[in-house]
Amino acid sequence: MPTAAPRVMTDRPTASPTGHEAALGPLSQIPPGEGRVFAVGTVEIAVFHTRGGGTYAVQAECPHRQGPLADGLVGGAVVMCPLHARKFDLKTGAGLGGDCDLQTYPLRLTESGEMWVEV
Ligand code: FES
C-alpha cells in the first residue's frame, strides 16, 4: 500500500523572467518513483519523478473522483490513482481506460536541476 506523499506548497517566486513559468525548486526533493504536489497560485499540480529519470507535471486530483494522484503508484511513465486504480499516461495525460484524461503542464528542468512549470 502506498504511503501518503507529503504535500509541498511552494511560496517561491511564481514568475520566470518571461513571466510564463513558476519555480518549483530542485528536482532532488522528489525521490525517483514518486510524486509531489505543488501549489502555483490557485492551481495544484502533481509533479512526478520516474525511476527512469522522467519528469512530468499533471493536475493534482484525479478527474474521476479527485483522488490524490501524487500518492499513486508510478511505473514507467504511468501513474495509477490510489482510489480506484485508473491509470494515466504521464507524458500525454491520456487515461488508459479511456473515460477521463489529465491536464498536463509543460515542465522544464534547468542544468542545475531546478524545475519550472508553465501553468
Ligand atoms: S478517483 Fe482516481 S480512479 Fe477514482
Image (cartoon, rainbow, N blue to C red):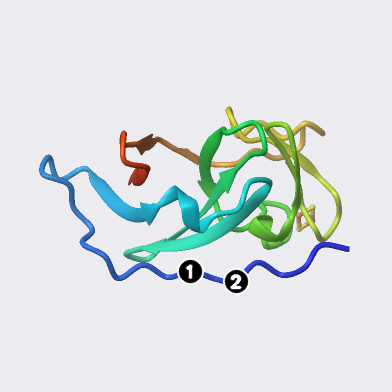
Can you identify the residue that label 2 sits on? Answer: 6
What is the number of the mark on residue 55? none
Q: Which residue is mark 1?
A: 8
In the rendered image, the residue lying farthest to the left is: 17
Crowding around mark 1 (Cα neighbors within 10 Å: few <14, some 14 to 19, many 20+) is some
Q: Is the CB–ligand 1 distance for label 1 below 8 Å?
A: no
Q: Is residue 118 visible?
A: no
Q: What amino acid is found at the position of numbered circle 2 in the picture?
A: Pro
In front of the other: 113 or 90: 113
Q: Is residue 114 left or right of residue 100?
A: left
Q: Residues within 10 Å of mark 2 (few under 14, many from 20)?
A: few
Give the residue displayed 68% in from the left and 32% down from the top.
Answer: 77
Q: Residue at x 80, y 58 (%)?
A: 82
Residue at 85 percent of width and 50 percent of height:
85
In terms of image quarters, where does ligand 1 lie?
bottom right
Q: Nearer the viewer, residue 118 or 47?
A: 47
The answer to whether mark 2 and mark 1 are in CB contact below 8 A is: yes
Residue 26: % across, % down? 39, 52
